[in-house]
Amino acid sequence: MSKVNVILVLSFVVASFTAFGQKINKLDSQGRRTGIWKKYYENGDIRYEGEFKNGKEIGTFSFYNQGSSYPEIVKIFSNTSDTASVKFYNKTRVKTKGKMVGKKRVGKWIYYFADGQRIFSEENYENGLLDGVVKNYYDNGNVTEETFYEEGRKHGTSKIYTEEGILIEDVIYVDGKLNGLGKYYDLKGVIKEKGIYENGARKGKWEYYIDGEVSAKGRPRKSMLKDDAKPKQEEEE
């Protein structure tokens, strides 16, 4: 290759890199981000990469932890709304996925066990707050807890189950506090105690059971209870 040709090739390469560099991290005439943007940590590791149009994120954005070549968060922005589909990763395995509007979670969010396949929890959000049913699961797929929320607080029924699917707790929340009838069962699903809650505290007389039958004195004998299972002191009516 002649000296002239070498110079031409080098000039083309330099021009290409210059042109490419001009397309990164640019602002439009109104000072808004436009085109491809990439940001880096001080050590040179990539922090995030994505594309803007008229100052708004479009398409796919990837966010990285320092020292990792795998994105920790991937956001895919809608072209017709402010909603973004979001996935959190542990390397190549999905940890969490859902949707966001700005920095607020909306709709259904799903959390996974470490294998990235089995569901650990399902939540519903409205304007960044828990709203609707929240379900948590054992690793065998059975529900461990099912609780309703409204505007970020427990509101409605809340039920807890054993790994075998047996109901052991059935209570009601109003504005984040226990209110109404509460029932507790043993590991076989047999009733142990029930009574009324008011503003988060037990109210009035509670019934206690032995083998599903009401205790003669209204509560189990102390000798039949473990220390951590003894009923709390009841409030006077």
Image (spheres, rainbow, N blue to C red):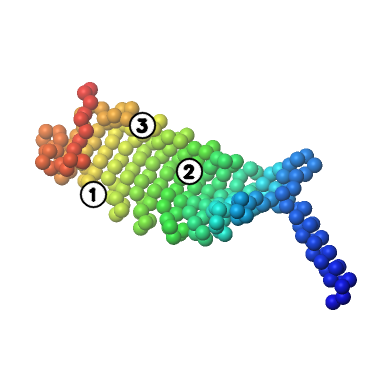
Please say if the residues under marks 2 and 1 sit with CB atoms less than 8 Å apart. Answer: no
Residue highlighted by disc 1: 187
Residue at the (77%, 60%) spot, across then down: 17
Instruction: Give the answer, above or below, for where 191 lies relative to 217.
Output: below
Mark before the other along the chain sequence, 3 or 2: 2
Q: How many marks?
A: 3
Q: Of all residues shown, which one is farthest toward the front?
A: 3
**Quarter of the image where one finds residue 202:** top left
Residue highlighted by disc 3: 177
Tell me if mark 2 has few (under 14), some (14-19) or many (20+) residues whose alpha carbon lies within 10 angstroms of its own.
many
Mark before the other along the chain sequence, 2 or 1: 2
Type of amino acid under label 3: Lys
Of residues 90 and 169, the one drawn nearer to the viewer in this rendering: 90
Instruction: Give the answer, above or below, for where 92 lies relative to 233.
Output: below
Type of amino acid under label 1: Leu
The percent position of residue 146, horizontal first and vertical second, equals 38, 44
